[in-house]
Image (spheres, helix red, strand yellow):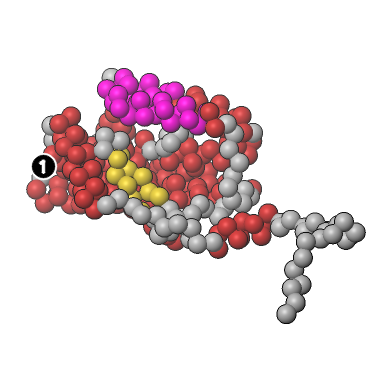
Amino acid sequence: MTNDTRRPGPWDPPATEQPREPLEAAVAERDQADPPPVQGQHPAVAIGATLLFAGFIWWITESWIIALALIFGLIVHEYGHVLAMNRLGMGPAKIYIIPFLGGVAAGQRGPRSVWDGVVVSLAGPLFGLLATIPFFGLFLLLGDPMWLLGAFVICMINLINLAPAPPLDGSKAIGPLLARIHPRVEQGVMLAIGAIVIVWALTRGSYIFGAFLVLALFGHLRRGPQVPSGRPLTDKETLQSLGLYLMTALACVAVAAVAPTILAGDALAGLDMIARYFGLRQ
């Protein structure tokens, strides 16, 4: 019985260094690897967090319809992220409800390309508009204008999420476009818009949301310029990302304008109500 495995001696020729894998092969190996599964929230924790968040909203707004609208709109919004993640090979994705703040969708692995990340980020606000359908239907059935207000609030939550400020969806959609110009441009824009959103939240009395944005913005700046984890955007995908972002924002504004238009019978009333909501008009 022989053993061909031995340690190299002093007169053996030096071992040649194995060539490193190309970046593409490394990325493919990462994607094919079986990552640890995303556990998700325990059902009891998810239900408790949802009820706690709903009760908090009800206490602030004194309206169970608004509380229902925000919770239902949040779940549908996050489910849009989940559908996109699963479709693009990032699943199975899970939804986590965070009391007093909102929710987050977590995938099994990162996006294969920056374009996939943009699609996932905008899938939430765009799909989230579907949550307004039951509220418009209940208004037609019951005639209570509070159901229209619920639909309006859902649209506003999705529109706020499009602000390019960390960690909102807009930062993940617009950030890669700005980073193509220069990483410092991306940081500068995020800092400026993030500061505006924080001031807006604090002046509106959303102190928890404002504090959360402060921490998120600080963490984003502390990490410095981010290197994309997947294939960078092509020129065509850059234009598509900008177009998809603008289309999603326009859809949110258009659906939000329906509710006040129905109540006032004037299309301009819808835009006026949106402006008043953001404090652009008194």
Of 121 and 216, which appears nearest the observer? 216
> In the rendered structure, which amino acid carries the disc numbered 1?
Asp
Q: Image quarter for residue 250?
A: top left
Q: Image quarter for residue 66?
A: top left
Is 18 situated left or right of 110 in this image? right
Residue 21 % position (x, y): 71, 57
Residue 199 colored magenta?
yes
Residue with the mark numbered 1: 144
Examine the rendering and report whether any part of residue 149 can be seen. Answer: no
Residue 40 colored magenta?
no
Of 209 and 6, which appears nearest the observer? 6
Residue 164 % position (x, y): 46, 34
Q: Is residue 209 above or below residue 79?
A: above
| Disc 1 element | loop
Which stretch appears magenta? 195-221
Residue drawn at 39 percent across, 54 percent down: 38
Residue drawn at 18 percent across, 29 percent down: 60
Q: Main secondary structure of the magenta part?
A: helix
Q: Is residue 103 above or below residue 211?
A: below
Q: Quadrant of the C terminus?
A: top left
User: Number of numbered discs present?
Assistant: 1
Outermost residue toward the front? 1
Outermost residue toward the left? 142
Q: Quadrant of the N terminus?
A: bottom right
Of 252 and 57, which appears nearest the observer? 57
Q: Is residue 4 above or below residue 107?
A: below
Task: For label 1, count other residues whose C-alpha is less than 10 Å away and answer few (under 14), some (14-19) or many (20+).
Answer: few
Residue 95 % position (x, y): 33, 50
Residue 261 % position (x, y): 24, 39
Residue drawn at 41 percent across, 58 percent down: 37
